[in-house]
Image (cartoon, helix red, strand yellow):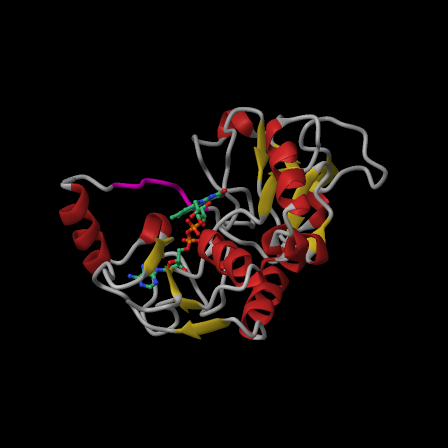
Amino acid sequence: MRDDIVIIGGGLAGSEAAWQAANRGAKVTLYEMRPKEMTKAHKTGGLAELVCSNSLGSADPLNAPGILKEEMRRLGSLIIASAEQARVPAGSALAVDRDQFSLKITQALESHPNVRILHEEISEIPTDCLCIIATGPLTSDKLSAAICAVTQSQHLYFFDAISPIIDAESINMDIVFAASRYDVAEASGGATLSASLSRTATTLPDAAPLPNHSGFKVMTTKRTARATVTA
Ligand SMILES: Cc1cc2nc3c(=O)[nH]c(=O)nc-3n(C[C@H](O)[C@H](O)[C@H](O)COP(=O)(O)OP(=O)(O)OC[C@H]3O[C@@H](n4cnc5c(N)ncnc54)[C@H](O)[C@@H]3O)c2cc1C
């Protein structure tokens, strides 16, 4: 029996689990298959890479996501501490610069004396140690097959859309305006860039891209279009 805790997957869950276990004195081996083996959504070899939205949701302690964040903060969460260091304006949401966020988590775990990071794909569930499987919705095919066998499941599916990431400097600011996503007054006028299509919507087919901006994702097609933007 190995005396370390094996964590498979260095995403959000695996990184937090490694941090918490290591801070309690456990020896942790964290297996992350990237960059040798990539998923269809990740782009880097960094730990805790955000593949889509850079928002971690509301930071308002009066609602459920905000309470969860406050609880994690009090438990010494690496994810929350890194998010706060990498925070970008997003109204009441906790949004981050995704590169800085991943970098801070990677550096914290790489420099932790109790954590060993191995960039290898694990294809079988280890049986000779305590093991946390944190491979998320994009678990590699081989490990998915192993999980199916153990759980006697046939269907381990996950469906999601992915937002395009747009460089803020590439946006024509003449056709967008800053606003609050939830119509809450914000000192800066708002951290979400929106484009009104009220005058042209009737001439555009559903889900048509905005003029000059084929990268925009049209989320509401009739009157307004909104895109998530990274600064
Ligand atoms: C296309 C898409 C869009 C999404 N958009 C959003 C969104 O906007 N907001 C949101 O909150 N959530 C979104 N999600 C869900 C998102 O994946 C989770 O919120 C979050 O990343 C889950 O964290 P995790 O640690 O479980 O998984 P991940 O962050 O995906 O981490 C799992 C890690 O395990 C690694 N891994 C996989 N298999 C193996 C293996 N066999 N051996 C070693 N390493 C392995 C992967 O490389 C990855 O780094 C999206 C998911 C997808 C696929």
Rendered residue at 50%/34% (across/down): 219
* Between 54 and 213, the one nearer to me in the picture: 54
Rendered residue at 38%/60% (across/down): 9
Residue 213 as seen in the image, left or right of residue 51: right
- The location of residue 32, given as percent across then percent down, is 39, 66
* Between 217 and 132, the one nearer to me in the picture: 132
Residue 2 as seen in the image, left or right of residue 147: right
Rendered residue at 46%/38% (across/down): 208
Q: Is residue 33 visible?
A: yes
- The location of residue 168, given as percent across then percent down, is 65, 55
- Overall secondary structure of the magenta stretch? loop
Q: Find the magenta span and give its range.
A: 157-162
Q: Does the magenta segment cover residue 30? A: no
* Between 52 and 122, the one nearer to me in the picture: 122
- The location of residue 224, given as percent across then percent down, is 59, 29
Q: Does the magenta segment cover residue 159? A: yes
Rendered residue at 52%/71% (across/down): 114
Residue 98 as seen in the image, left or right of residue 10: right
